[in-house]
Image (cartoon, rainbow, N blue to C red):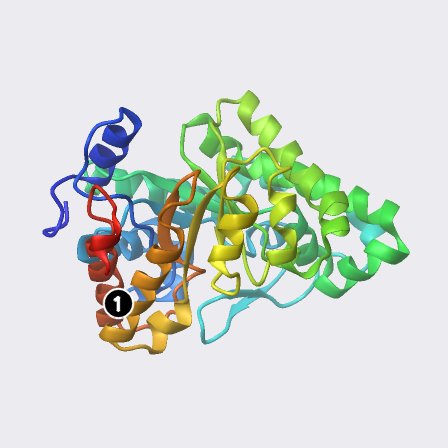
């Protein structure tokens, strides 16, 4: 347990579920790559479970955030089908070559590649979750993060190809998306069967219109979740990058309880638009945490709380997206310090005014 807290994340979560008082409300910290600052390289962390776990264990020990998520890898499914990957300076895995030169070739991909016994990336992620749970005495919920079907399809065939296919070959795209949904289902099987929490992200879907979202994103997300729920999953967190203001009402149609929104979205508008139907998580700018001062980061956190603390369906403070790997650890300390002050239970304006 962090020195500035009186409860572990699990104690806090169970108390909230039971309607009991807590020391503070939960605080999220999306930081899958800052572990490089704790002595693990990309190559080590993406090939060795102990190094992947080390990133998050050291992050939790320093910051005390609520919830940890082991990234399966944004490029994990394409890699299982022979794609090559690299990393840009911001720490984001990048698929170098599309697996499919033609989306009609999706029939040539074998889902057996994603069975747990054949998928090295899933094995590393699963083992990392277990290592974290063991080392931290299971005091924090530790899950795994996957890309959703639309983003997976874009990673398999190329984003431009997928976006063009929405107009020129919708039938072919639906076939690819159906495969991407099956791939997502399969890669999540081991985690769902072991009651490990899951988060899904659809960064590529921020590029589409509401009409396109309803046709090409929502049905395949629901297909994945319906199957996982058959296996015992209680639901998944959902994050989508970029300015999704135009898509907010689409999210209410996805059978989800809440949405994690990027800092590009006006959180007041999100509250007014869907706050009576969805809990909201967000949305302090990761760039502010990267480039700001302790004083400006504190103000950003206060502003976010002031705007959305009274969301009818609940609010959780979090960065709008992943914190860049270059962010000074002291800046993340400032974010957590300000968030603890604002999130003191009971949450009320005097915490930040």
| Closest to the observer, 153 or 292 | 292
Above or below for 321 versus 314: below
Q: Quadrant of the C terminus?
A: bottom left
Q: Is residue 107 visible?
A: no
Q: Is residue 341 left or right of residue 98?
A: left
Q: Is residue 173 left or right of residue 135?
A: right
Q: Is residue 322 left or right of residue 215?
A: left
Residue farthest to the right, as pictured: 168
**Residue at the spot x=57%, y=48% of the render?**
273
Q: Is residue 342 visible?
A: yes
Q: Position of residue 245 (x, y in %)?
A: 60, 57
**Residue at the spot x=82%, y=61% of the render?**
164
| Closest to the observer, 10 or 264 | 264
| Quarter assignment of residue 19 | top left
- Total tally of numbered discs in the picture: 1
Q: Position of residue 259 (x, y in %)?
A: 50, 46
| Quarter assignment of residue 15 | top left
Give neighbour class at mark 1: few <14, some 14-19, many 20+ (Cα, 10 Å): many
Q: Secondary structure at mark 1?
A: helix
| Quarter assignment of residue 227 | top right
Above or below for 132 versus 307: above
Q: Is residue 252 left or right of residue 72?
A: right
Q: Which residue is mark 1?
A: 298
């Amino acid at each position: 347990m962090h020195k500035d807290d009186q409860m572990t994340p699990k104690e806090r979560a169970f108390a909230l579920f039971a309607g009991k008082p807590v020391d503070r409300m939960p605080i999220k910290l999306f930081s899958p790559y800052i572990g490089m600052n704790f002595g693990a390289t990309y190559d080590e962390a993406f090939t060795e479970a102990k190094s992947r776990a080390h990133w998050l264990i050291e992050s939790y020990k320093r910051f005390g955030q609520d919830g940890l998520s082991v990234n399966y890898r944004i490029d994990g499914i394409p890699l299982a089908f022979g794609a090559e990957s690299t990393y840009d300076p911001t720490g984001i895995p990048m698929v170098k070559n599309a697996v499919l030169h033609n989306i009609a070739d999706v029939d040539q991909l074998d889902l057996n590649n994603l069975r747990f016994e054949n998928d090295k990336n899933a094995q590393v992620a699963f083992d990392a979750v277990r290592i974290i749970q063991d080392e931290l005495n299971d005091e924090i919920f530790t899950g795994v993060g996957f890309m959703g079907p639309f983003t997976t399809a874009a990673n398999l065939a190329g984003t431009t190809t997928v976006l063009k296919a929405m107009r020129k070959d919708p039938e072919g795209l639906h076939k690819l998306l159906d495969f991407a949904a099956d791939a997502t289902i399969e890669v999540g099987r081991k985690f769902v069967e072991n009651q490990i929490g899951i988060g899904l992200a659809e960064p590529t879907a921020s590029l589409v219109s509401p009409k396109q979202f309803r046709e090409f994103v929502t049905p395949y997300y629901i297909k994945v979740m319906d199957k996982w729920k058959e296996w015992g999953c209680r639901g998944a967190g959902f994050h989508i990058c970029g300015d999704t203001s135009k898509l907010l009402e689409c999210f209410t149609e996805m059978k989800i309880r809440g949405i994690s929104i990027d800092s590009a979205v006006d959180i007041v508008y999100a509250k007014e638009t869907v706050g009576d139907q969805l809990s909201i998580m967000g949305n302090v700018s990761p760039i502010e945490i990267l480039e700001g001062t302790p004083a400006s980061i504190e103000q950003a956190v206060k502003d976010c709380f002031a705007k959305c603390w009274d969301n009818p369906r609940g609010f959780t403070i979090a960065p709008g997206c992943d914190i860049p790997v270059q962010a000074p650890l002291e800046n993340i300390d400032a974010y957590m310090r300000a968030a603890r002050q604002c999130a003191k239970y009971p949450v009320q304006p005097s915490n930040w005014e």
